Image (spheres, rainbow, N blue to C red):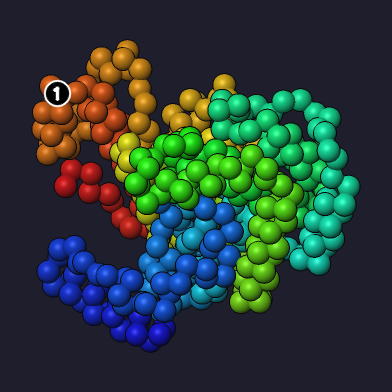
Amino acid sequence: MRSDCGDLLQKLVRRYQRQRRPISINFRQFLPELNSADRFNHLLHPYPAKLLVHIPYFFLANDVLSKPGDMVLDPFCGSGTVLVEAQLANRRAYGVDANPLARLIARVKTTRLNTCATKRALSDILRTLPTEPSGQRPDVVNLEHWFYPSTTRQLQCLQEAIGRVRTTTIRDFLTVCFSVCVRKVSLADPRLSVPVRLRLGQYPKDHPLRAKSDAHLRRLRRVRVAEIFSQIVRANIGRMEKWERATVGTIPPEVICSDARQLIYEYSSNGNRNKRLRDESVQLIITSPPYPGAQKYIRSSSLSLGWLQLCPTADLRACKDRIIGREEFSKSECIASAPTDIANADECLSVIRRRNPMREKIAATYLHDMRDAIREMYRVAGCGNMPFQE
């Protein structure tokens, strides 16, 4: 399979060099053996608009664009799909993401775990789990809207027990599993990434989802959160064990910062803290950039962000504003236009502005932010001068 990827990639490169036009490829069709969803630890935690695993695998399963030991960058790494595949391909890797939940998931996915100690920690938690919480009410947006009171109490007890785990890697792993549990026991529709509350009788009587949806809500009335959490932890330990066996001797990836527009060692502990990522230090960039207003990453993560204390409710708007492709602006922010100095883009933006100033602001801000991010990608990959005017 590796040689097939290399052969096809070389053909595609030669074809692009001749034609200078984008090339369409069906990765699912070319790599059907990867269509099974549960590959190593990619399913550790759900995340909206996850990159198809076939894509990084295709570009890394050969030595055409990078070689073992080379540095791979994903400036919009999400929950770490590229980072995991880069490590499996024996590359070093850096990830960047504005969403604190994504950074936590990606870090846990790529950090070695003492699974025996984790199993003991789980047993200790389940054995000593209190029946009533001792801490304050969690700072979760619209808490009563999303959780039955009994579920909230159980989640609080579980969260307090996880917080007493002393080993950071185990506590972080269990925290990610807790985040999965939070969404599973919430009243949010499990079919949707952005939380939308389910209600009894939400669907018409003859609708195929009516019985399933109502039965799900009735189960949540009597759900045992600890049992759900235990199932999630045990399944994810198995995924981590599978991943660790496949990555022996490799260098763990690192989530270095939160802003693709400024590639610095924001979280580094190796003496590079707050230093810029060096020019021409990256051999390959694989990423799936955000779209303007297309994915509501912070809204999708809002329940976990609150329960995990990653973002207070009062800071959710500010967290959204840091996302490239943000979808919310005040009316005052939309008063002035923001030309990009890209002729075709500004012509389109002018048309959009006459119809909807908010949409124009969303699109213009996205183009400005992406230009800054691409400028940084060009810098660290050593691609020469960026053709801003093309």
Q: Is residue 104 left or right of residue 321?
A: right
The residue under the point 20% across, 67% down is: 23
Q: Nearer the viewer, residue 370 or 354?
A: 354
| Whole-percent x, y for residue 341 in the image | 19, 33
The residue under the point 35% across, 31% down is: 327
| Whole-percent x, y for residue 238 in the image | 67, 69
Placement of the N terminus among the 4 image quadrants: bottom left
Q: Which residue is mark 1?
A: 355
Q: Nearer the viewer, residue 261 or 141?
A: 141
- Examine the rendered structure and indicate whether residue 173 appears above or below residue 337: below
Q: Is residue 346 left or right of residue 48?
A: left
Q: Quadrant of residue 254?
A: bottom right
- Examine the rendered structure and indicate whether residue 224 appears above or below residue 254: above
- Examine the rendered structure and indicate whether residue 181 appears above or below residue 139: below
Q: Amino acid at mark 1?
A: Arg
Q: Nearer the viewer, residue 367 or 245?
A: 245
Q: Quadrant of residue 66?
A: bottom left
The residue under the point 24% across, 17% down is: 336
SS state under label 1: helix
| Whole-percent x, y for residue 365 in the image | 31, 31
Q: Residues within 10 Å of mark 1 (few under 14, many from 20)?
A: few
